[in-house]
Image (tube, rainbow, N blue to C red):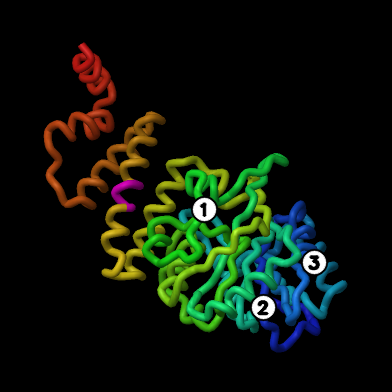
């Protein structure tokens, strides 16, 4: 059972900030402080869903809620309610309940292990959303922080480039480069949440594509948040092959959600991810996975591979020793 701690948060906030947290004792105080530091001309509520941590996160959240009942709505959750995907716990149930409880016209996301560094973030984003009512949401750049070293999030994702002022659905179906900690969107287009949001391995990519069906995502060119890369991260610390599998399965759900309008994008991206995963599996000597990926690739393309393609791609997956002999013969 989830319990909301008594509070005096505004009944009609313009913005609801949503934070799901678990085992974030080293990070959650900065998260809460970043929201409290926002300089705005409108009421804000900060919804925190605490997933029964054992490292002191819950105590930190309780103290913060007692200090700021006029802003913080703290939801104390039980670990038995956690939803698992691909054998790992997620914040899916927590986030869903927080979205349902939010009362603002806009929802801003800030995961418990990230924090805002720009006191003007919310005001600037709301101003832009009010000026562009056709936008479904907007986002900014962020810093990735790993062992006290910062890298530019979007430039890392986009090969040194930055997004256009507006990003359409088809671009986001191809890849989700929106930093969750900077994302703000309209609440009136959120519900009903699609099945893919509940079923996919990760929900943030699904959420962005779901909302982008109602309008483009605007971009504000400033760094407003720091994303902490740490060992407890659900996805960030997993190996590349696992991440590619997560993307493939999530893209499958997204494809069903968006339908024919993006079928070509889904098909092309699926091929690219399968090829990348196949190369990665072969390079790591994970031959069973390489064979499975080869079969999936053939089924996906609905093609009969040529002999040359079988020799180039399939042979290493089934017969790595023979493939090495074949490569030597070709070089000679």
Image location of residue 268, percent across then percent down: 29, 53
Residue where numbered disc 2 is placed: 15
Specify the quadrant of the image occupied by residue 76: bottom right
| Cα distance between the residues tagged 1 and 3 | 27 Å
User: Residue visible at 40% across and 49% down?
Assistant: 245
Q: Nearer the viewer, mark 1 or mark 2?
A: 1
The percent position of residue 287, horizontal first and vertical second, equals 33, 33
Q: Nearer the viewer, residue 6 or 224?
A: 224
Q: Residue furthest top?
A: 332
Nearer to me, 247 or 85 = 247
User: In the depicted view, which residue is nearer to us: 104 or 68?
Assistant: 104
Picture quarter with the N terminus: bottom right
Which residue occupies 40% across, 60% down?
171
> Is residue 318 one of those drawn in magenta?
no
Q: Is residue 298 visible?
A: yes
The residue under label 1 is 162
- Percent position of residue 294, x then y: 26, 41
Answer with mark 3 or mark 2, whichever residue precedes in sequence: 2
> Of circles 1 and 3, which is in front?
1
Query: Mark 1 or mark 3: which comes first in sequence?
Result: 3
Dot 3 lies on which element? loop
Above or below 44: residue 173: above
Residue extent of the magenta highlight: 269-273
Q: Which residue is mark 3?
A: 37
Residue 58 visible within the image: no
């Amino acid at each position: 059972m989830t319990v909301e701690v008594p509070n005096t948060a505004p009944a009609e906030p313009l913005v609801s900030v949503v934070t799901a947290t678990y085992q974030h004792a080293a990070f959650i105080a900065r998260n809460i402080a970043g929201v409290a530091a926002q300089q705005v001309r409108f009421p804000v509520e900060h919804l925190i869903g605490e997933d029964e941590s054992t490292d002191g996160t819950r105590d930190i959240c309780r103290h913060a809620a007692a200090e700021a009942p006029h802003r913080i709505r703290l939801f104390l959750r039980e670990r038995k309610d956690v939803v698992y995907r691909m054998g790992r716990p997620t914040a899916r149930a927590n986030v869903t309940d927080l979205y349902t409880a939010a009362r603002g016209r806009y929802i801003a996301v800030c995961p418990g292990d990230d924090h805002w560094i720009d006191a003007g973030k919310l005001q600037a984003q709301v101003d832009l959303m009010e000026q562009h009512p056709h936008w479904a949401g907007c986002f900014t750049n962020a810093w990735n922080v790993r062992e006290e070293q910062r890298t530019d999030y979007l430039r890392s994702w986009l090969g040194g480039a930055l997004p256009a002022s507006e990003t359409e659905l088809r671009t986001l179906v191809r890849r989700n480069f929106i930093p969750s900690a900077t994302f703000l969107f309209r609440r009136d287009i959120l519900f009903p949440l699609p099945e893919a949001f509940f079923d996919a391995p990760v929900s943030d990519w699904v959420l962005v594509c779901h909302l982008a069906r109602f309008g483009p995502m605007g971009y504000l060119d400033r760094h407003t948040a720091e994303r902490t890369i740490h060992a407890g991260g659900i996805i960030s610390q997993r190996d590349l092959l696992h991440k590619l599998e997560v993307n493939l399965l999530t893209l499958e759900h997204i494809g069903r959600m968006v339908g024919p309008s993006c079928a070509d994008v889904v098909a092309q991206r699926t091929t690219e991810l399968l090829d990348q995963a196949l190369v990665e599996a072969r390079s790591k000597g994970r031959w069973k996975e390489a064979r499975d990926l080869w079969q999936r690739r053939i089924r996906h393309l609905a093609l009969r591979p040529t002999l040359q393609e079988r020799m180039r791609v399939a042979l290493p997956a089934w017969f790595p020793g023979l493939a090495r002999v074949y490569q030597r013969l070709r070089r000679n």
